[in-house]
Amino acid sequence: MRSWKDTIQLEIIQNHPQFILVKIHNGGLIKPILTAIVYGNPNPIKRKSLWEALKAAIPSDNTPWMALGDFNALLSEEDKKSSSIIGKRCPHFREFLESKNLQDLGFQGPFFTWQRGGVFERLDRAIANEAWCQMFPQCLITHLTRIKSDHRPLLVNNNLDFKLPRGRPFRFLAGWAQH
């Protein structure tokens, strides 16, 4: 186990060819969290093993789990923009997310995270299980500026000090659209 700062300790749980799984212990957290840092193989045949290995890395209990990085896979055709090439989504990626009930954590910033020439793709993202989403409901992923890379780095901000507004939550009523 390695210490980072005085209160954070990292423990490498698994070192897979396409991801590293770490357990993060923080004195301020009730329980440790698991994070997988992913670099999916660009070859779809080799990348297929990533989905099964990540499935096995997700805890069956209520431990918060997140994966982020370059999955090298498209979830939808909209994840690619090019004048001549149509985006081909990865059905294995979608099946993986659905089978484990994982959420894409969304983002702020430019939509596409990878660019080469006139081809733009969203290959980089953060996903999490329900326990993560409950522990960090204000988690914010930001697509940063590309510097000396064809990928945008991802910034994860758990924003634990963010306070939600008090009072009644806003509810949209469908009838308003017809009024």
Image: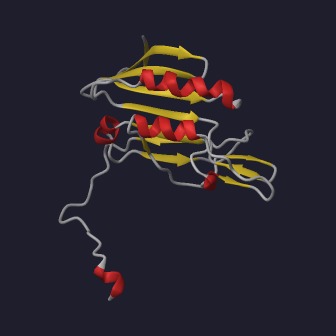
Q: Nearer the viewer, residue 93 or 167?
A: 93
Residue 112's place in the image compared with 52, above or below, is: below
Residue occupying the point 29% across, 23% down: 27
In terms of depth relative to the viewer, which is nearer, 116 or 57? 57
Left or right relative to 90: residue 61? left
Q: Percent from the top left, x then y, of residue 111?
A: 60, 54
Name which residue lies at 53% across and 20% down: 20
**Residue 178 falls in image quadrant:** bottom left
Give percent across and percent down for residue 98.
43, 40
Q: Residue furthest bottom?
A: 179
Q: Residue furthest top?
A: 1
Dividing the picture into quarters, in which one does residue 161 lie? top left
| Quarter occupied by the N terminus | top left
Query: In what quadrant of the picture does the C terminus appear?
Result: bottom left
Q: How did the renderer colour the structure?
A: secondary structure
Nearer to the camera, 103 or 88? 88
Residue in the picture at 37% in, 36% down = 129
Determine the residue positioned at 77% across, 52% down: 85
Look at the picture and state if 112 lies above or below 7.
Answer: below
Residue 122 % position (x, y): 62, 47
Question: How many circles with numbers are drawn on the protein?
Answer: 0
Q: x, y percentage for residue 45? A: 67, 27
